[in-house]
Amino acid sequence: MEKNIPDVKLGIIAVSRDCFIISLSERRRSEIVKAVGNSVNLYESKVTVENEKDMLKAVDDVKAAGCNALCVFLGNFGPETPETQIAQRFDGPCMFVAAAEETGNDLINGRGDAYCGMLNCSYNLNLRHIPGVIPEYPVGTAEDIAKMIVEFVPVARAIIGLSNLKIITFGPRPQDFFACNAPIKGLYDIGVEIQENSELDLLVSYKAHANDPRIQEVVDDMAKELGAEGNNYPALLPRMAQFELTLLDWIEANKGCKKYVALADKCWPAFPKEFGFEPCYVNSRLASRGIPVACEVDIFGALSEYIGTCISGEPVTLLDINNSVPRDMYESDIKGKFSYNYKLEDTFMGFHCGNTPFCRLAKRSKPGVKYQLIQHRLLEPKDSEPDFTRGTLEGDIAEGPITFFRLQTTPDTKLQAYIAQGEILPVATRSFGGIGIFAIPEMGRFYRHVLIQKNYPHHGAVAFGHHGKALYTLFQYLKIASIDYNQPAGVRYPTENPFA
């Protein structure tokens, strides 16, 4: 199937107020393009916008060039009406930036006043209810703006992806996991489509894929990925390969008018017995290809995972904010051993049965296909060998920087989000499942005064790397009113007891 996240082709359009020297804006635009170089697929429109007719020509020009995102550059003060109409007429995300003055030796004909023009631009965008991305400090030299353009690309990729996303689900949320349930109106508010299906629909389709001639090819690929150490149940692979093909074919047949897809499926309690395996490893393989699959029909978990995939451009995972780190383990393996002096309450274990992509698991933990211990206790005879509860992908999650986040709707359909940056520590978990020891500064306070206080569910999306800046920009663009983060020590949450 086609790539599941968009490629961004960015256009840059310079604007110029007609009482300023147009060549100033044009020269500064060309210097930005030179500074960007090959780091971004950037098209330079040579149509400089002074009026509404220029605006129409410029928009037609970038559309004809195949651009799906824009940088509108105020090379001087800029004409506030046509420059904002660019975003109104262009079908895609637009970033607005402005030129800094270049030298104290040329502040007559060389002065552009874009610092002032940016204020009028933002005011006009708001008057017209036109969304636009405005960087934290949107005024700069060519080199400064080149950096803003590079940072805009993942945000643009997510905006384009969401506008073309369908979430496909199978089954209702499991009993006692209503925390993953949420009204779907929030999806429509940001342009995401949803198709909800029965588990029975999926089972019928799975059975129809029996003896699919493509199964062996997928089995071979699974065996290659797992290697000899990780391929613990070779005879199970054909069942899982059949399921993988079922999901991929369902996507192609059902994405309809949308280009991209994320999935959310009900993985227990009926699934393993009826399908003959746990879906975790297959879910992990789709996630590694940029097709997130959220467990327990977590619709907004799937949405968050897809956002993380677009922002990072790499596979992500979805984990339970699961359990605290035992004090003896903290004392022996964590305390005082890292550059940041983490407290016990800064740490926790992120866990799921086995949906994290193989490429994100630490080789030291010898990852491989195993069985779901909890469901084996629940669903299969006591002391029996695991049968249909096999199919998880287990191992410690590899160490490194992470961003833990979620976009979620409240029961009264208001969208809210959180973002926290931290790391996975290179510490053995001594446990089961796909699991890692996470460390986030001031996590204990964040856990209480954001996650608990604002009624977030137990699932969080994990993007590998620090992507908080891009995520925050995206959530602002989507007009998410409540965006929380882990407050540093000394900065009080509104609900934090000042006497504690």
Image (tube, grey):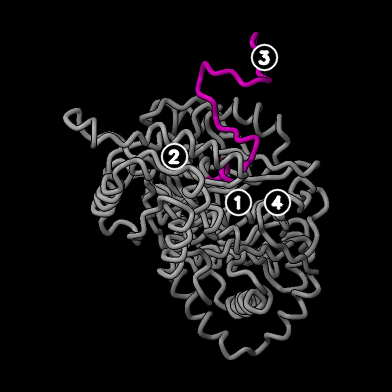
- Image quarter hosting the C terminus: top right
As drawn, the label of residue 304 is 1
* Mark closer to the chain start, 1 or 2: 2
The residues bearing labels 2 and 3 have C-alpha atoms spaced at a distance of: 34 Å
As drawn, the label of residue 189 is 4
Give the side of residue 477 with respect to residue 426, left or right: right
Q: Is residue 169 magenta?
A: no
Bin the neighbour count of mark 1 within 10 Å (Cα to Cα): few under 14, some 14-19, many 20 and up.
Answer: many
Q: Are marks 4 and 1 in contact (CB under 8 Å)?
A: no
Q: Are marks 4 and 3 in contact (CB under 8 Å)?
A: no
Q: Residue furthest front?
A: 19
As drawn, the label of residue 135 is 2
The residues bearing labels 4 and 1 have C-alpha atoms spaced at a distance of: 15 Å
Which amino acid, by three-letter code, is at mark 2?
A: Pro
Comparing 172 with 65, the one in front is: 65
| Nearest-to-viewer mark from 1 and 2 | 2
* Vertical placement of residue 359 versus 500, above or below: below
Q: Quadrant of residue 254?
A: bottom right
Q: Are marks 3 and 1 in contact (CB under 8 Å)?
A: no
The residues bearing labels 4 and 3 have C-alpha atoms spaced at a distance of: 35 Å
